Image (tube, helix red, strand yellow):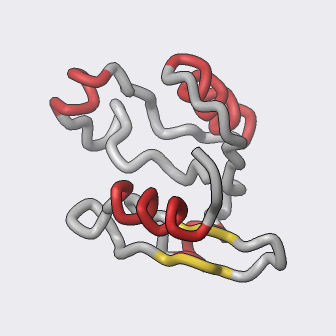
Amino acid sequence: MYIKEAHPTDEWQLPANERDDVCYPQPKTLEQRRAIAKDFTKRFGWDVPLVVDTMDNLAEEAYAAWPERLYVIATDGKIAYKGANGPKGFAPDEADAWLKALLPGP
């Protein structure tokens, strides 16, 4: 889920964002937030759905997702995996290993 920008160009831009070419201003409208999400997924070749939080940031607040956190939602809609809060607890490799152990195939 794309939530509010952690390091927008008009607030607190980091050198890593410039290096990785992920430089966006803080969106002021839902349309701007959607456009950033679409641009990001296209440029970085994401082939998984990316949903966008509302401008009142309800999902970000409910899931304590700022600045980053990984969740896996089971087919029954319940949280099956909840990673630690980032950036220090952000562990994509841990989530990947968890998914590989759970799911058959490549």
86 vs 21: above or below: below
Q: Where is residue 17 in the image (x, y as percent from the top left)?
A: 27, 30
79 vs 46: above or below: below
Q: Which residue is drawn at 49% across and 77% down?
A: 82
Q: Position of residue 91 (x, y in %)?
A: 32, 61
Q: How many marks?
A: 0
Identity of the residue furthest to the front in this view: 105
Q: Quadrant of the C terminus?
A: top right
The answer to whether residue 83 is left or right of residue 88 is: right
Q: Where, by quadrant of the figure, is residue 11 drawn?
A: top left
Q: Position of residue 47 (x, y in %)?
A: 65, 32
User: Can residue 22 be seen by looking at this rendering?
Assistant: yes
Identity of the residue furthest to the left in this view: 15
Q: Residue at x 68, y 70 (%)?
A: 73
The answer to whether residue 29 is left or right of residue 13 is: right
The answer to whether residue 76 is left or right of residue 43 is: right
37 vs 67: above or below: above
Q: Which residue is drawn at 16% across and 30% down?
A: 15
> In terms of depth relative to the viewer, which is nearer, 6 or 74?
74
User: Can residue 69 be seen by looking at this rendering?
Assistant: no
Q: Where is residue 105 in the image (x, y as percent from the top left)?
A: 63, 50
Q: Where, by quadrant of the figure, is residue 12 drawn?
A: top left
